[in-house]
Amino acid sequence: MNMSGIFGDVRYGARMLLKRPGTSALAIVALALGIGLTTTMFSIVNGAILRGLPFEQSDRLVGVARAPIQEPGNDQGATADDFLDWRDRQQVFSEIAAFQSTSVVVSGVDGAERYRGAYVGANMFALLRMAPERGRGFQPADEQQGAPRVVIISHRVWENQFRSDPNFLGKTLRINGQPSEVVGVMPLGFAFPETEDVWMPLHLQRAPVRGQGGNSDVIARLKDGVSLAEANTAMKGIAAQLANEHTENKNFTATVQPFIQQFIGSDVVSTLFTMLGAVFGVLLIACANVTNLQFARALERTKEIAIRSALGGDRLRIVRQLFVEGLLLSGIGALLGLGIAQVGVTLFNAGISGTNPPFWIDVRLDSSVLIFASAMTIAAALLSSILPAIRATRTGANDALKDQSRGTTSLRAGVLSRVLVGGSVMLSSALLIVSGLMIKSIIEVGRARYGFESSNVLMARTTLDETSYSTDGKIQEFIDRLTVELRGVAGVRVASLASNEPPGGPFYYMTREGKTFEKPEDAPTVRRVAATASMFEVLKLQPLEGRLFGPGDIAGAEPVAVITKDLAEKHFKGESPIGKRVRLGLKPRVPWWTIVGVVPALMTGNRVDNEQNWATAYVPLSQSPERGLSVIAATTGDPLASAPGVRLAVRNVNQDVPTFQVNSLEGRLAQQGWPYRVFGSLFFAFGVSALIMAVAGLYGVLAFTVRLRTSEIGVRMALGADGPRIARMFVRQGMTVVLIGLAIGVAIGALLSPLMSELFFNVTPRDPMVYTIAITMLLATGLVASLVPALRAAKVDPLDALRES
């Protein structure tokens, strides 16, 4: 094969494409959409998962977790005892380290600022093979109890707190109220494990009773030559040893997974890969359409190809020529597709920009994405060109000339064309169903009823350090002073303080007085929020039964609680909860809270799969002081206009207390819906593109069939068939393909949609409205695509048709 021959094929192929510009343009647009959308989704998966952490040999980094044997997939952090035993006994990792994410208050010359931080083992940076840009890393002595406090900061903190002073080493920062010596600065962009800026040594000690104490996340680096499966086997063996030695470990094993997969969760990973698999359906539909167009081209050129073969043309050369034509179509489509992918990547990055994504997520068109797009281009060319080329070169010259004279051909491949169209309808049906479910999720997020007032409400967070606020009395003093300061903020009508913003709050096990459980963990979980009494006024929550908090609900008085209606209905089964007592949490000396009131349920438009439980118990902040506080203020106008006054109010109480996450309550709630908007928009593009291409493919095949069977139609009409009968024949053929493809596609959509349920809001995977709309759209568009060529067939003049035959 010489280069001149290839260039000749390219020139000839280009002329053939220009000979039918309309058909070529349709093929290019279809391939551009297929390659562009597939490349967009691959870029997202690659940037979030496949590329891995931005460290040397990141594919060797794994997460190690403690997992209940009876609950596979429910990975947990490791206790100090488990981690220390793993570290001492394992032989499969070159390094293993524990870490705990947290938030810290850094006090400097310009006041206090809140950062994300992490307590890490001294070997963490060596494990990651990342050294500080300036200064040193942690040393084993730094993680010993009683060691001088040291801290390593990010490049951003160095710029903010030290103005990039090169002589910062040895200086101190107050971290959570404690002076700590700065010993190093990490390189720009480093933020392990997620978006951290401050790192402190992790002091791990065995607990007095095994299993007690906080949990840590664990990362490890596989030794050279050790596989993931071997590491899993080894760690499960160690877990089995510990189970034999300690009763606290008898129900637990250990798991080893790629670090990112473990960190972001298997549900997110499976959802992203499901979306990547689904968008391949769009590319397959594009290839099916182009294949049918290439069949049409081959049919029109049957005589030319047969004569070339009769004159000694090499069959492989002819197949190569047709493949080059397909490659030209795919190549041009790929160039346009990369433009579509760039737009998609830009929109995706804009969509997640306000969500503070993990530092390793870097969605862009890099070399691996370009290699993927090139592979998709070649695959599309092969899929859409080789089969028509092989079919076109099977026919001899005599058969081809006879077929041409009759106006028909054995190359028609009508059955195969209809199979390809049916496959396109099938894939588009499945994609359209999932797309519809996600679009409905976006609509439901927009009209969700939260059960509380969300307009003209300002939100802000603040946190108190353990050193300055070591007792409940000091915390309450800050709360009282800040409450007074907030009353004087311009534009604030009423303000409150709470441990969490609505409708949030951490989960606690709830135990009713007089009711016991075989295991404490069998108790139901409810959310708990500690708040001042004015929060109910801010959110306009009125009691449905009983009362709200009053002046007498203070520290030392009987602990009281106000619960939401859904909690009362679910756990008190029709009886009045007023006067009943509950405990929230499993820790020793947890008080009994007497229920004094019931308020409306929050988040009444919640997810119908019941994964989210918004049943909430409110307790007075004075009876359960918290260091992490939300300011919730009802304003007379634009909430953000009062933000500077709120910041000043906090600073007036203590300039070392930071104010962060300032936003309107409506803005905060809108931020929480970003996955539905971003991924819903992506799937909407998948579904619409699939529908358009499937319908266009059906129209193209039927239109070409009508043109090919003109003489046959003339004969039928000459024998007495009228126009409506001819039209019905072609509509029946088209709708048969649509119905078969639709039936299979709906079944596939029903199987695919549960895999995407993580991205559904207030929508079930079997939502009848979505299925009805999707099926109706496909039937309607399929009917139109069949009817237009059918009406054209009905208008054929039998004399002209017979004259042309």
Image (cartoon, rainbow, N blue to C red):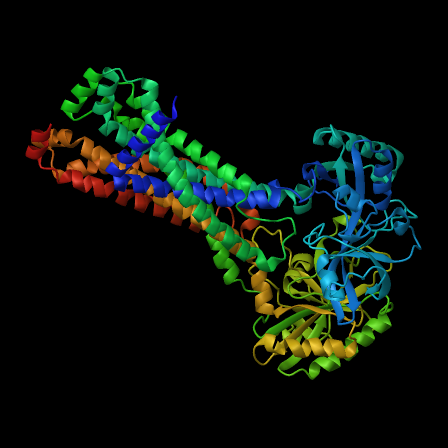
User: Looking at the image, can residue 451 be seen?
Assistant: no
Location of residue 235 by image quarter: top right
Count of labels shown? Answer: 0
Q: Write the residue at 83% across / 42% down.
A: 83
Q: Nearer the viewer, residue 460 or 557?
A: 460
Q: Position of residue 430 (x, y in %)?
A: 44, 41
* Residue occupying image coordinates x 71% and y 36%: 60
Q: Nearer the viewer, residue 796 or 334?
A: 334
Q: x, y (%) of residue 647?
A: 69, 75
Q: Is residue 261 above or below residue 400?
A: below
Q: Where 481 sits versus 403, above or below?
A: below
Residue 321: where, in percent of width, then height? Answer: 33, 26
Q: Is residue 799 left or right of residue 762?
A: left
Tell me the quadrant of the picture where the C terminus can be found: top left
* Position of the N terminus by quadrant: top left
Report the side of 662 relative to 285 (left or right): right
| Residue 549 screen position, x and y as percent | 73, 74
- Residue 291, compared with residue 360, is above or below; it is above
Q: Quadrant of residue 725?
A: top left
Residue 450 at least partly seen: yes
Task: Determine whether 578 is above or below 434 in the image.
Answer: below
